Image (spheres, rainbow, N blue to C red):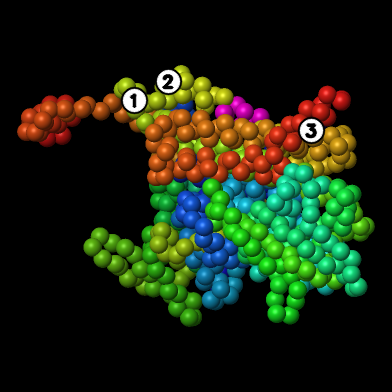
Amino acid sequence: MALDFTFTDEQEFFRQTIRDTVDRLIVPRAQELDDTEEWPEDIWKEFASLGWLGLRHEEGYGGMNQPVVNQMIFYEELYRGSLGFAMAVTMQVLMGTYFIKRFANEEIKQRLLVPAIKGDKKCVICFTEDQSGSDLAGTRTLATKVDGGWQINGTKQWVTQGPLADVATVLCTVDPSQGLKALNFFLIEKKTEDRDGFLPGQILHKVGGRCAITGELVLDNVFVPEENLLGEELNKGVTYAGEILNEVRIMTGMSALAISKCALEDCREYANNRVAFGNPIGNYQLIREKFARCWAWYEAARTQCYKCAWMIDNPDNCRVTPRELLELCMAAKFHATELCVTTVEEAMRIYGGNSFCTEYPVQRYWKNAMYALFGGGTHEVMKDYLGRMYLRK
Amino acid sequence: MNIYVLVKYVPDTEAIVKVASESELEIENKYFTSYFDEVAIEEALKLKEKFGGKVTVVTVDNKKIDALRRGIAMGADEAVQITDPGLEESDPFGIARALAAFLQKEPYDLILCGRQAMDDDAGVVGPATAELLGIPHASAILGLDVADDGKSARVDRQIEGGKEHIRCSLPALLTAQKGLNVPRIPQVMGMMKAMKADVRKVDLTELGVDPAMVGASGQKVRVLKYEPPPQRSSATMVEEDFPENVKHLVKLLQEEAKVL
């Protein structure tokens, strides 16, 4: 009797604790956070002081070392609040600190990772450039070997929290002609009087999740010492990126599920109370059909995402190859995020004209949901890949 | 100070509750620690920070210990679950009997709990427990100032038109009202500690409680039946122009709603 779809009592308590934290700290200001482009440093400090930024890191550095399933419980509750704040937290917890933990030496970990877990240093990761997003082979930020280290030149775009960052993990190429085979991660700090580093560039003004300040990072002849090359071997950047891609994709799926659930619950209350032609609109079949479809898909996508999280935690028991797990995580992300976009569109239809009014939350879900279509990889690229892989099976 | 906090895990205020039959409620599986109990836990922790000592959270619950975990996560030191099949269907008096039987063997300086549980709103367990223990009690406190020697306390209560200031000797049982403090959000390390916490379990035999005094046989208050609230009727629109609409409305209030 191997299948068990329940969470443990400890996981339910974990969920309730983060849920309560989000309800108290973030939900009351969610509309303001997602609509205005002001970073809430006050909420960040309080959230960080509770210890949540150490979710995936070892206890020796102040972390909690939680399994992936618990991390996904965390994201599922976190993304019920403000998308922008959740994106900033996720960047800090996952992408911005992963490679420091994985490859940096102990001195760098003590100097950067420990304060990052406390929220005192903001850490980001940089992939996208002007001409390369999904196409990492198009990376043009160049790292040139020099005496004692590397000289780096280029501009990175779409860096969540980039303009506020203290530390960046930057994907660079050492030879643009080699495409994916020449990619490497470098640790680069913000430029100061005493230290070479990146400079914040133009801020990108987003449609949703606006309190996370997104923008460019400019690297102008930045020198970094040898130990700032993050990796055991040169030119393994793509391989190393793959180490967190599964988690990033499931995390994106969880964010979409959280937005879907908020939309469904708000719509349920609206449909049960909004009266048209003498009846609550929830009495009409075409409204009920929307709930039936979106709720059934939501439950399926949620189970799929948690199954993938469990498989990441249990590589020896899950009986899939790493390649198959990658495909399953990609499929789960694709399903959950497409469902979310459908759900928020249906939510807008349920609210009717009121959906166009900023007094109602549904327009915020609609704006926020769209990021999931390309965050962590565009669906057009993913679908082509998934279809190709499936046809080869 | 040795402080005991009585806590209860109750349905979330947003949980959907349906009347399944006259004898049964169907409650959505969404629970939380009763907010007034969290206020009590917070007050206990503040006193511990000032005076030192220990905070123990206690619950009477056969199924869930999440309220105890919440207390540990917030900073309580120990947790006790009073659990026994004989406690099923206990009314608040039965719960109070079990709690009093436990507490009378414990070295308490102060007992705190919420002014009422957020499911039944009975507000009985606190005062009944105090009565059974033979200690002073003040309810729905909004202010608490324990004397430096720990032997008395000044307590503030909201009353109609003003505030009441009471001095009582300790040990006492005080029930907490919203506004006494703002409960702290548990830190992650507290939550981790709570997830691994050892919970002491105590049953009726250990307490020496006569099973006839708790459970269904010990009920002083019995639920006769559950009824759903009346269905809201659809609105009647008063469409005439002024002043006919006023006359029509008054007529409806007199003859149909019968409130005038």
Report the amino acid beneath label 3.
Tyr
Q: Which secondary structure is most common in the magenta stretch?
A: helix
Q: Which residue is mark 2?
A: A284
The alpha-carbon separation of the residues under discs 2 and 1 comes to 10 Å
Q: CA distance from mark 2 to mark 3?
A: 40 Å
Residue A178 in view of the camera: yes
Give residue B256's position: percent from left, percent from top: 16, 26
Chain for numbered disc 1: A
Say what amino acid the circle numbered 1 marks: Ala
Left/right placement of residue A7 relative to residue A350 reads right
- The amino acid pointed to by label 2 is Tyr
Judge if badges 2 and 3 mark residues of a common chain. yes
What residue did someone put label 1 on?
A: A276
Which residue occupies 70% across, 63% down? A218
Quadrant the C terminus of chain A occupies: top right
Q: Residue at x 78, y 69 (%)?
A: A222
- Label 1, residues with CA under 10 Å away: few <14, some 14-19, many ≥20: few
In the image, the segment drawn in magenta is: A294-300
- Name which residue lies at 41% across and 22% down: A283
Which residue bears the numbered disc 3?
A: A385
Q: Is residue A255 above or below residue A63?
A: above
Residues at discs 2 and 1 both on one chain: yes
Image marks 2 and 1: residues in contact by CB distance under 8 Å: yes
State which tag comes first along the sequence, 1 or 3. Answer: 1
Q: Position of residue B3 (x, y in %)?
A: 54, 66
Q: Position of residue A217 (x, y in %)?
A: 68, 61
Of badges 2 and 3, the one in the foreground is 3
Based on the picture, tell me whether residue A297 belongs to the magenta stretch.
Answer: yes
* Label 3 chain ID: A
Tell me the chain of label 2: A
